[in-house]
Amino acid sequence: HGVERWGIFSGYLGDGDVTLALQHARLLAFPSLYEGFGIPVIEAMNMGVPVACSNAAALPEVAGGAALLFDPCSAEEISAALSRLLTDGSLRESLIAAGYNNARRFSWTRSAEQMVAVYQRACRPGFAGRMSRAQ
């Protein structure tokens, strides 16, 4: 579908390279078939980069309606989504604004606080016994 003419297929990037790439990106295409969370989607949104991503696994929930979703197994859907993001300025602007709002739902501090709360509940007396009876 001609994507190779204007897309960059980078493979793995370190943190500094991710930031640099996103600073110069017109969009983030994320055609993942399986994603446990989708940090690249949030990173892009936080930097004002519109996102087109897979409608699989955790990505629709993480994207929170702030991304253009596509079937990652359909070259036609991926191509159409990228084309729309590159040519429809009002769509780009609305996804950028929605992305900023969506990215605010997530923070490392909040994640750490929630993990501490889980560990504290797990360390309460009798927790392990309740778990074994539930299985």
Image (spheres, rainbow, N blue to C red):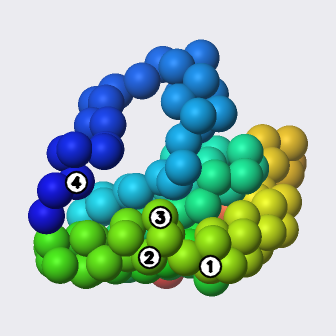
Residue 91's disc is: 1
Q: For numbered disc 1, what is the local secondary structure?
A: helix
Where is residue 129 shown, x and y percent of the image?
A: 58, 65
| Residue drawn 26% across the image and 70% down it | 79
Task: Answer with left or right where residue 18 lies relative to residue 89.
Answer: left
Compared to 120, does 23 lie above or below? Answer: above
Task: Answer with left or right where residue 135 lies relative to residue 129.
Answer: left
| Residue drawn 59% across the image and 34% down it | 24
Q: CA distance from mark 2 to mark 3?
A: 5 Å
Task: Answer with left or right where residue 41 lies relative to residue 84.
Answer: right
Compared to 126, does 111 lie above or below? Answer: above
1 and 3 marks in contact (CB < 8 Å):
no
Question: Considering only order in the chain, which callout, 3 or 1, is on the residue closer to the N terminus?
Answer: 3
Residue 67's disc is: none
Q: For numbered disc 4, what is the local secondary structure?
A: helix
Residue 3's disc is: 4
| Residue drawn 72% across the image and 45% down it | 47
Where is residue 115 shown, x and y percent of the image?
A: 74, 49
2 and 3 marks in contact (CB < 8 Å):
yes
Q: Amino acid at mark 3?
A: Leu
Residue 86's disc is: 3
Q: CA distance from mark 1 to mark 3?
A: 9 Å
Compared to 12, does 114 lie above or below? Answer: below
Question: Considering only order in the chain, which callout, 4 or 3, is on the residue closer to the N terminus?
Answer: 4
Let me know if residue 99 appears in the view. no
Q: CA distance from mark 4 to mark 2?
A: 13 Å
| Front-lying residue, 104 or 36 | 104
Q: Amino acid at mark 1?
A: Leu
1 and 2 marks in contact (CB < 8 Å):
yes
Residue 84's disc is: 2
| Residue 6 occupies quadrant | top left
